[in-house]
Amino acid sequence: MSNRTFTMIKPDAVANNHIGPILAKINEAGFRIIAMKYTRLSPELAAKFYAIHKERPFYNDLVNYMSGGPIVAAILEKNNAVEDFRKLIGATDPAKAEPGTIRNLFAKSIDANAIHGSDSNENAEIEGSFFFSQTERF
Ligand code: IDP
Ligand code: MG
């Protein structure tokens, strides 16, 4: 069944000129872009987006990093989108990410790991709605 996931190309990947190569990987893997935005999270919005992690020791660093520079946010569509996109990006720690995955190719560390991908259909909808209204989806 065709469904949707949400992604962000994170500040480290944007700063290192990896937007183009990462979008190419996403297109080659068969995802259709439903919505896309080049933007920057305020510290308040980054804190809200990652509120699920607020008890974790790296939360403050994560909020500072995610608000530290521009990002690309997007909603993507494909059969089995959430699971297939998590496979395409690879493990959270790029040192453990499979060869050829986006984090293996473009991330340097577990904290600055190039890209976000939703972990469930429910979170994909919540996260997509955090950035995009219905009229911004095509
Ligand atoms: P995920 O992005 O692979 O779903 P999560 O566990 O949901 O990984 O963590 C969210 C984000 O928090 C990660 O992508 C990474 O940027 C950051 N993060 C996760 N674990 C650590 C850690 O141990 N140290 C520093 N940052 C971390
Ligand atoms: Mg996660």
Image (spheres, rainbow, N blue to C red):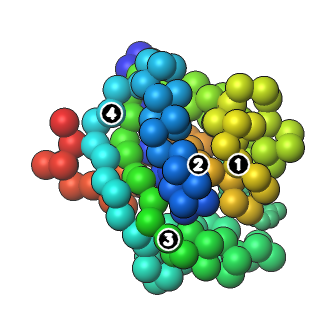
Residue 115 marker: 2
Q: CA distance from mark 2 to mark 3?
A: 14 Å
Q: Which residue lies under the disc numbered 4?
A: 33
Answer few, some or many: residues within 10 Å of disc 4's Cα (few below 14, many 20 plus, some between 14 and 19): some
Q: Residue at x 47, y 29 (%)?
A: 24
Earlier-in-chain disc, 1 versus 3: 3
What amino acid does circle 4 point to? Ile
Q: Secondary structure at mark 3?
A: loop
Residue at left offset 47%, top offset 45%: 19
Q: Are marks 2 and 1 in contact (CB under 8 Å)?
A: yes
Foreground: disc 2 or disc 1: 1
Residue depth check, mark 2 versus mark 3: number of the one nearer the observer: 3
Q: Position of residue 17 (x, y in %)?
A: 52, 50
Q: How many marks?
A: 4
Q: Label 4's element?
A: strand
Q: Nearer the viewer, residue 34 or 109?
A: 109
**Where does label 3 land, which residue?**
69
Disc ID at residue 107:
1
Q: Is residue 51 visible?
A: no
Some atom of ligand 1 lies within 8 Å of the CB belonging to the residue at label 2: no
